[in-house]
Structure formats: C-alpha cells, structure tokens
Image: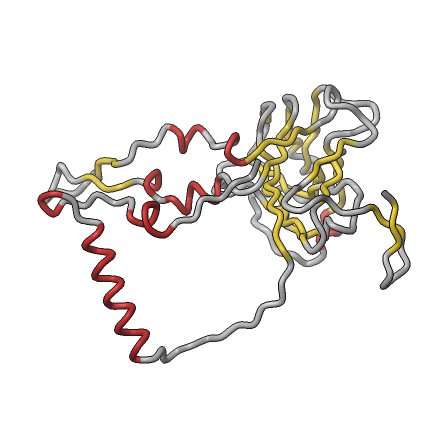
Amino acid sequence: MIQMFKNNKKLSIAPAEDNTIEFLLTDTDVTTSPVNIVRGIDNIPDWYKNLTIRTPIIGDIQNPERTEFTIKRCIPVLDVLTLGYYIVTARDYTFTYDEKKGCHTISGAFNTNYQPVTMHPIEQLGGMPFSSEYCVFAYKWTNPYVIKTPAGYSTLISHPANAPYLPFYTLGGVVDTDSYFRPINFPFLVKNTFSGILPAGTPIAQITPFKRDEWSSKIITKPSDEFKVSQNLLTEQYEKDRQGPGGKEVGGVYKKLYRTKKRYL
C-alpha cells in the first residue's frame, strides 16, 4: 500500500509486518532470476559440515597424540554462518580473466531483462585501497529482489561470513529497508587470479536485518573491584564447567549456558 512520509513528503510503501523480512521478486520470474534467496541455516558450507570436533595437532614432539577442538565446537562461528539470509547464484557463471585488459568476461545463461553482472570503472570506488590480488574494475551483481523489513529495521549487506576462499569480495552496506523499496545491487571485486566457474548456489551476499537503535558507548579502563571479583568467580566456574570426568576438557559450555539460539525462518 502506498503511503506518504510525513517528514519528507515522499511516497513509499508500507513496511513489512513485525518480525518479518520480505524478498519481493520484481520484473522477472523465479525461473529467470540470476539469484535466489536462502536461509542462513540452509547455507552452511561443506567445509564446516565436514569438520570433526577434534583434530590432531601436527608437530607437537612432546605430545604427538595431542588433539584440540576445532571451530566446529565454536558456536559463535556457527551463529554467524547461519545469521540471516543469503543471496546465492541461481545458475553457473563462468569468469574468464583477460590479463591485457585487466578485467573479466562473464558468460552464462543470461536473462534478457537482467544482466547478472555489470562492470564499472574502479574510479567509482574513489581512493578506497584494496589488495593487488583484485583486478582494477568494480563489478556489481544484479538483484531483482526488493528487500522489505518492519518499521524501524534496516538491513546489513555483507560478504558471506567466514568465506575468504571465495574468488571475489562483496562490499558491505546498510540500507533502510523499511522505507527504500527498490532492488539493491551488490558491488564486488574479483581476484585477478580467478578464471573459472562460480557454480549455482554460490553465496554472494549475506543479508541481516537489524533494529535501528541509538547507542552510547563507555570505555572503562579501570573496572570496579566488585566487577573484578565477580569476573574472577565467573571465570573459575566456567573453567570447572569445562572439565569432564578425569579432568578432561569437554567444551560446549557456551552453547549450554550462555547462547541464545537465533531463528531466521
């Protein structure tokens, strides 16, 4: 429903319902869209799924049988991997790097209405420094989805969490998706060492809705004695909770006692 903003008299659309983020496909259909939307929980990468809880530590001469917990035990890593939603490629796209031109050509099944990737002069990034491993052109994923959040909520758009292995880097941004109802495209850089296929299902951006609040900050360099005592007691209890039978470290304390599960449906 069209509505008029009182503060600037601009026409807009009513925001989404409470606790709901909407992805509205525009000017195309799902069979020809260059990208799809998936929940974070449905996009856990294989490298994480295939991790064991413990791994041998190679090179420890004094204790050759030593093992340590992997980040599979680290719940904050899982929480950020499953945070929000992902924009993923809907089909394969082939990137071929031309050393003479210093840029890539992209081929694949293109929609006539939506070029999946557009190329832009690097000058548009101004003086932003970036690694020489990226080619000197900026690219942009075309996104035909409008993102719509409830009143008071914005959307953080970022590179997929913990994915430095991807041959591109998506630039971050924040959009007030409770008032701006246009498709948001995603600028990115491509590594100049990459020539190959980005398969369908490759995450290109992570989408995280958040409530806008005004925050104040305090830098406390000398906490009170009461805080220090409490902190020491909590640390002692935490270390006790980590010990299993025979004093063996069992881990999982954060998940059991501190974590609040996040849900994005």
Q: Quadrant of the C terminus?
A: top right
In the rendered image, the vertical position of residue 33 relative to residue 175, given as above or below:
above
Task: Residue 70 in the image: state x and y as whole percent.
Answer: 30, 40
Task: Residue 261 in the image: state x and y as whole percent.
Answer: 45, 44
In the rendered image, the vertical position of residue 154 relative to residue 82, given as above or below:
below
How many callouts does the rendering have? Answer: 0
Residue at 70 percent across and 46 percent down: it is 149
| Snapshot quadrant of residue 119 | top right
Q: Quadrant of the N terminus?
A: top right
Relative to 250, 207 lies left or right: right
Residue at the far front in the pictured view:
18
| Snapshot quadrant of residue 211 | bottom right
Looking at this view, is 117 or 14 the one in front? 14
Relative to 263, 120 lies left or right: right
Residue at 76 percent across and 47 percent down: it is 15
| Snapshot quadrant of residue 204 | top right
Task: Residue 16 in the image: state x and y as whole percent.
Answer: 72, 44
Looking at this view, is 222 or 148 the one in front? 148
Residue at 75 percent across and 34 percent down: it is 24
Relative to 25, 96 lies left or right: left
Query: According to the image, what is the colour scheme of the structure?
Result: secondary structure
Task: Residue 71 in the image: state x and y as whole percent.
Answer: 34, 41
Residue at 73 percent across and 23 percent down: it is 30
